[in-house]
């Protein structure tokens, strides 16, 4: 997978997702170019409630990324991988 496209700051996107109410953690965040004009994003958010739509709206409005996949995890246990 390519690196984060120029003009998009990975840490800023991560911090914006963490600001969403009830989001405790963001992991497996990936941002890449589908083409020269289209970006994609995927991420796992640790939250006790479904914040999928809020996250998608944030990413679309602020970063103009319209191809998103958000997965909600109730807890993150990297030791169980």
Image (spheres, rainbow, N blue to C red):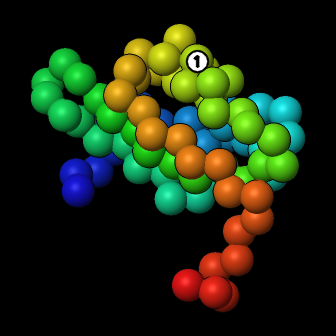
Q: Position of residue 67 (x, y in %)?
A: 35, 28
- Answer with left or right where residue 37 lies relative to residue 77: left
Residue found at x 60% / y 43%: 14
- Answer with left or right where residue 23 lies relative to residue 63: right
Residue found at x 42% / y 33%: 68
Q: Position of residue 49 (x, y in %)?
A: 81, 41
Q: Nearer the viewer, residue 15 or 51?
A: 51
Residue 23 can be seen, yes or no: yes
Residue found at x 48% / y 17%: 60
Eyeballing the image, is 43 above or below 69? below
Question: Image quarter for residue 51?
Answer: top right
- Answer with left or right where residue 31 lies relative to residue 46: left
Q: How many marks?
A: 1
Q: Position of residue 69 (x, y in %)?
A: 45, 39
Q: Disc 1 designates what residue?
A: 57
Name the secondary structure under disc 1: helix
Q: Position of residue 24 (x, y in %)?
A: 80, 52
Q: Nearer the viewer, residue 20 or 52?
A: 52
Alpha-carbon neighbours of circle 1 within 10 Å: few (<14), some, or many (≥20)?
some
């Amino acid at each position: 997978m390519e690196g984060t496209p120029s003009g998009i700051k990975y840490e800023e996107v991560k911090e914006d997702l963490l600001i969403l109410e009830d989001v405790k953690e963001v992991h497996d965040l990936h941002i890449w170019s589908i083409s020269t004009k289209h970006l994609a994003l995927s991420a796992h958010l640790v939250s006790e409630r479904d914040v999928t739509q809020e996250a998608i709206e944030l990413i679309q409005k602020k970063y103009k990324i319209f191809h998103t996949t958000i997965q909600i995890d109730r807890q993150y246990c990297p030791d169980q991988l």
